Image (cartoon, rainbow, N blue to C red):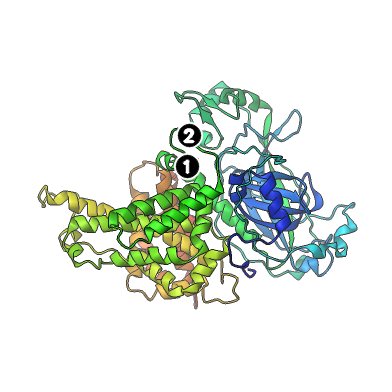
Amino acid sequence: MASPAQSGFPARTNSRLDAFLRRHLAPKDYDAIRAYEPCIVVSDSENHTFKYVVLSDRLIYLTENPPKSIRWAVALRDVVAIELIDDYPEFLNSPDREINQHIRIIYSSTVNKEYGKSKGIGKLLFPFHHASASNKKVTEENNGPDFWKSSELRRLNESPLRCRPESSTQSKDSTVGSPSNFKESSLHGQVAFRPLPSPSRSSCQSTPATGKTISRTSCTTDTKETQDLVSHKGYLSEIPYKCNGNGNEFYLENSFLTSTFQSSKNLEKRDLELHLYIISTTSSIFLHLKSSWNNYNIKATLLQDPLYASELGPTAGSEKPYKSEEKIQHFSQLKSELFLKDNSLSKTLCLIMELRVAAQKNFILKRLFWKTSDLFYFLVNKLQEYLPESRDKNAHHNKSQRADELAACIEILQTLGQMFRETETESSRLNTLTAKKGTLFNLLVILISKPQIPKACSEFDVQSANLTSVEMPFDAELQKLILKYTDTATALLYEILLVFQQGNFGLGSTKFAINWMMSLLQNCPSVLPFVSSIVKQVVKGLSASFQLLSPCQAILLYQQFYILKSCLQYSKTLAEYIRNDYREEFRYFIHMSALEKRLPLYYPITQPTTQLFHEVLKLIEQKPCGKC
């Protein structure tokens, strides 16, 4: 991975493109831009054109180089696969073809069979029935431009990271091809990252790609099928929709949902391809594409949870035009209040909760959080005050006080989790995490350590009635808080694992690679009980009744499998422990039929969870290797 962009906020690498995006995108859409990169584009509508690919949290845009207009090319909800192809495109001149990164994005599109045109609304998206795409080599078109063999290619910028500055300028003359109210929807993603492969001399046959169309089954429905689809929660979750006041009628982009179904008889689902050729070995745009796809996948699943969706939505009568300045001012006020020395625990808890909810709604607050390191250190230090045991000796015997402390710790972990989510493109986050590795390691130790609680309730069984009616509520509450803490710590550990999975942070050092992290964790006394608790939670979740997992439970299951995979893949000690102590659990309780019964197909997270599950089972069955 390339060296990170220069620290600072906002980070500017192309002032002309930044100014263009600020003018032509709404402020909220502009703040959602994650990265951009110059590239050569090949698709069904682009023939080896030199453009910028611009990545946001929901869309992949294309704009000319230099920029003149901008349109969204692919919605992340429609992505089927993002692949790195090992090839030597003939339309590139040497040595450009040897340093080229060829990224293929396969996405689904609804085409009108009568007119052969893609439909922008009323897309019928059926989850997880995408045909697998093979890495077919393609040949250069006879009319491929010789322009790409000229010295003009040298204009390609090698800088790997394109972070967006904040702006409050309202769009006036937008030429964007997508509506500003583009809704959240389903997506099928993967989290696995793959480094740029070494060029294979056996593949020296050139493979520039053309936009290939893969025919799909026509999505026609009769009356009965339409009724079934309308009643299917998974289908509705795939479609951007609005409902009227009584919630009985659904509208799809200003039209009734029923009329969309009636017109679906002329629609056909196809897989299209978008090929990006990045003339750089150091560009990180492939990792950012994969990360954004996975982030969208998780968020689309969580949005099916009413409680989570209500937190993101505006309160009644409070919706205001989006302004970056107001978000920055709000963050500064929260930060100054948090740093007051006379804050009580309850006051601190309220402020942290407000920060988390605000960051969940506005990405700009996450950027501000990582701009300086003081707030990150503040939250970690707060955790150390209460975990794994409280510094206040009174809390060792006072169950009510300990419950308050655990509730505050859970809120801090959730806030840190929000700040890690979707911020992999922020160079300031890298600067903060690398400045004091000890703080990050302290956080890791906290996450895998079980919080200590008053001894009287440490052996409490919620099912038992040995305690008095006065003692029971506190003991039951503490046990519930411990379970919630474990789930929250698991989610945050997953986010930190993603950070380490990106290798050496682009600093040219392996000290922060995931092998370094696992080598530290495997020496902690609390890591084995933590791994054991994760396996037991997975067993409990899959061996329970046939009740479907909630969206939050489904995401947690994915995160648990991801942590188990990392332990099996990067730590010889932890891998041997899991294989030796829990082989029977994986044989009798953790199997595919159990997963299929609990995980709904209409969750976007289902497909990547299933793939991750197969990878974990394969690692469990492997014989111990000589080194990990």
Q: Which residue is mark 2?
A: 233
| Residue 506 in the image, given as x and y percentages of width and height | 60, 71
Query: Which residue is at a point 18% across and 59% down the rendered structure image?
Result: 459
Which picture quadrant has residue 549? top left
| Residue 569 in the image, given as x and y percentages of width and height | 49, 68
What amino acid is at disc 1? Answer: Leu
Q: Is residue 387 visible?
A: no
As rendered, which of 559 and 185 lies closer to the eye? Answer: 185
What amino acid is at disc 2? Answer: Lys
**Does 170 sit left or right of 564 as displayed?**
right
Task: Characterize the local packing of mark 2: few (<14), some (14-19) or many (20 or more) Cα atoms within 10 angstroms.
Answer: few
Q: Earlier in the sequence, mark 1 or mark 2?
A: 2
Describe the element under mark 1 as helix, strand or loop: loop
**Mark sitting on residue 303:** 1
For the N terminus, the quadrant is bottom right
Q: CA distance from mark 1 to mark 2?
A: 12 Å
Find the residue positioned furthest to the top: 223
**Does 362 sit left or right of 221 as displayed?**
left
Query: Which residue is at a point 68% across and 54% down the rendered structure image?
Result: 18
| Of the two numbered discs 1 and 2 in the rendering, the one whose residue sits closer to the viewer | 1
Task: Characterize the local packing of mark 1: few (<14), some (14-19) or many (20 or more) Cα atoms within 10 angstroms.
Answer: many
| Residue 353 in the image, given as x and y percentages of width and height | 38, 51
| Residue 127 in the image, given as x and y percentages of width and height | 56, 41
